[in-house]
Amino acid sequence: MINNPAVVVIDMLNDFVTGKLEVKRTKYIIPNLKRLVEAARSKGVPVIYSNDAHYPQDVEVTRKWGNHAIKGTEGAHVIPELEPAKGDYVVEKRTYSGFYETGLDPLLRSLYKGEGAKTVILGGLHTHMCVRHTAADAFFRGYRIIVAKDGVEAFTLKDHEEGLKYLENVYNAKIMLVNEIIKEFK
């Protein structure tokens, strides 16, 4: 059983799935993430969307990747298949980590009637970048980390596989299939 979990869906946005920085491999994880968030909602597990919402002047990111997921544009919206539902949370971010200068940590600590989330279940994009940096900050804050192996992806299989190994070896992330995670929900 997973202790006080929260599902964090990272950057499942139009610009990454079908737009400017399209990850063709994403099509394989969409049904898995959909099952994960629906199961979480049905069991009362909080679902949080950690989404890029850049300003064009975010040079640390846009200089590297060009303008993408610009706040207020269609490219910055969650894809229709995974649209946030009533009761879900959306936390905007402007860098790779879902924690860096966002309200994610206070939100997680306020869940479960103030007892706080103890485990973050990460899914989305990109295994070796935004998932990795979000996992790092979760690790540094004392959260247990689970990564949905079939619910994360990257530009290439190599990036994805190396990202998973890094998450497991460095941040002690437990790598699990979505169906395994769902079975652990109370």
Image (cartoon, rainbow, N blue to C red):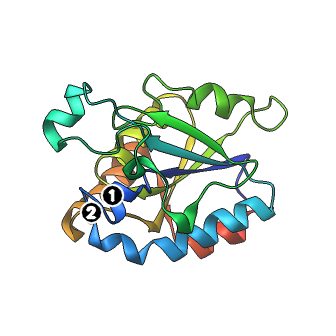
Residue 104 position by quadrant: top right
Of residue 57 and residue 124, the one placed in the foreground of this image is 57
**Which residue matches tag 1?**
16
* Residue that numbered label 2 is attached to: 22
Residue 144, image x and y in percent?
57, 44
- The tally of labels here is 2
Q: Is residue 148 above or below residue 117?
A: below
Q: Which quadrant is the C terminus positioned in?
A: bottom right
Residue closest to the eye, 48 or 66:
66
x, y percentage for residue 14? 39, 58
- Above or below, 72 against 36 in this view is above
- Residue drawn at (53%, 76%) of the image: 31
Dot label at residue 103: none
Instruction: Report the residue at 49% width, 55% height from top.
Output: 78
- Amino acid type of the residue that numbered disc 2 sits on in the rendered structure: Glu
| SS for dot 1 | helix
Mark 1 closeness class: few <14, some 14–19, many ≥20 residues within 10 Å: many
Residue 47 locus on image (x, y percent): 66, 51
Q: Is residue 103 left or right of residue 101?
A: right
Quadrant of the rendering where the N terminus is positioned: bottom right
Q: Earlier in the sequence, mark 2 or mark 1?
A: 1
**Residue lying at the far right of the rendered structure:** 113
Q: Residue at x 56, y 71 (%)?
A: 178
Q: Residues within 10 Å of mark 2 (few under 14, many from 20)?
A: some
Drawn side of residue 9 relative to residue 162, left or right: right
Residue 75, horizontal then vertical, whole percent = 37, 51
Mark 2 element type? loop
Q: Mark 2–mark 1 contact, CB under 8 Å? A: yes
Amino acid on which disc 1 is placed = Phe
Residue farthest along the left direction in this orientation:
63
User: How far apart are the two marked residues, 2 and 1, measured between alpha carbons?
Assistant: 4 Å
Q: Is residue 87 above or below residue 157?
A: above
